Amino acid sequence: MNTITYSIGDSLYLNITNRCTNKCSFCIRYKTKLFNSKHELWLTSEPTTEEIIESIGDPRKYKEIVFCGYGEPLIRLDEVKKVSKWLKDNGAFVRVDTNGHANLIHGRNILPELKGLIDAISISLNAENNELYEKICHPDFGAKTFDDIISFIKEAKKYIPGVEITAVNIPDINIEASKKIADELGVNFRVRTFYEQDYIR
């Protein structure tokens, strides 16, 4: 059975696609179809906007609603915008967890379209240069993807109130180097702990 929404603590997560433009070596999706051993996040079909909204219920019950599942949510940009509009109209705080490829995916700067709809965006960086990013994340867009993500982060600051970059704490990733990039860009930084069974963000 498809899991569209799942809660952790006081946050509700929206799982809207399995598609992704990265093939990260550490990604939980390649290890199990069950998240936290109970949420079946591997979708057999992508939910419609209506199905996503129906599965949320009352968004005011949660501290935040987060687009984050087994794929890259901004691949489904139209659905993210429509659901976010409904969420904002109903008093929700909305966050998107993304790999930062959306402008590459859609061939345009999509960030102005998220203004007023998204309160916070969390961008997985996981590297400090193109070479390491390609080695760890295996992006569909090739060797210059890292540079495009940096540009995406800079643009995000113009339209979204809360911007952070994250890095997973594994030996291949230099956490201090990633934090330095965040400091230079003037955005928040968060380390994501890597642990398979309890991998929640």
Image (spheres, rainbow, N blue to C red):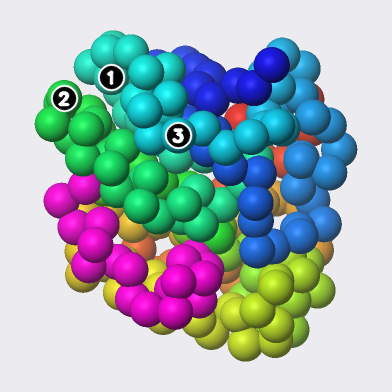
**From the viewer's perspective, is residue 137 above or below residue 88?**
below
Tag 1 secondary structure: helix
Q: Do the residues under discs 1 and 2 have CB atoms within 8 angstroms?
A: yes
Q: Residues within 10 Å of mark 1 (few under 14, many from 20)?
A: many
Q: Do the residues under discs 3 and 2 have CB atoms within 8 angstroms?
A: no
Residue found at the very far right of the displayed protein? 31
Q: Amino acid at mark 2?
A: Asn
Cα distance in 3D space between marks 3 and 1:
18 Å
Let me know if residue 199 appears in the view.
no
Q: Amino acid at mark 3?
A: Thr
- Which of the 4 quarters of the picture holds residue 88? top left
Residue at position x 65%, y 79% in the image: 141
* Nearer the observer, 67 or 164: 67
Is-magenta flag for residue 144? no
Q: Which mark is residue 90?
A: 2
What percent of the width, then of the height, locates residue 14? 47, 31
Residue of label 3:
48
Q: Do the residues under discs 3 and 1 have CB atoms within 8 angstroms?
A: no
**From the viewer's perspective, is residue 32 above or below residue 146?**
above
Let me know if residue 152 appears in the view.
yes
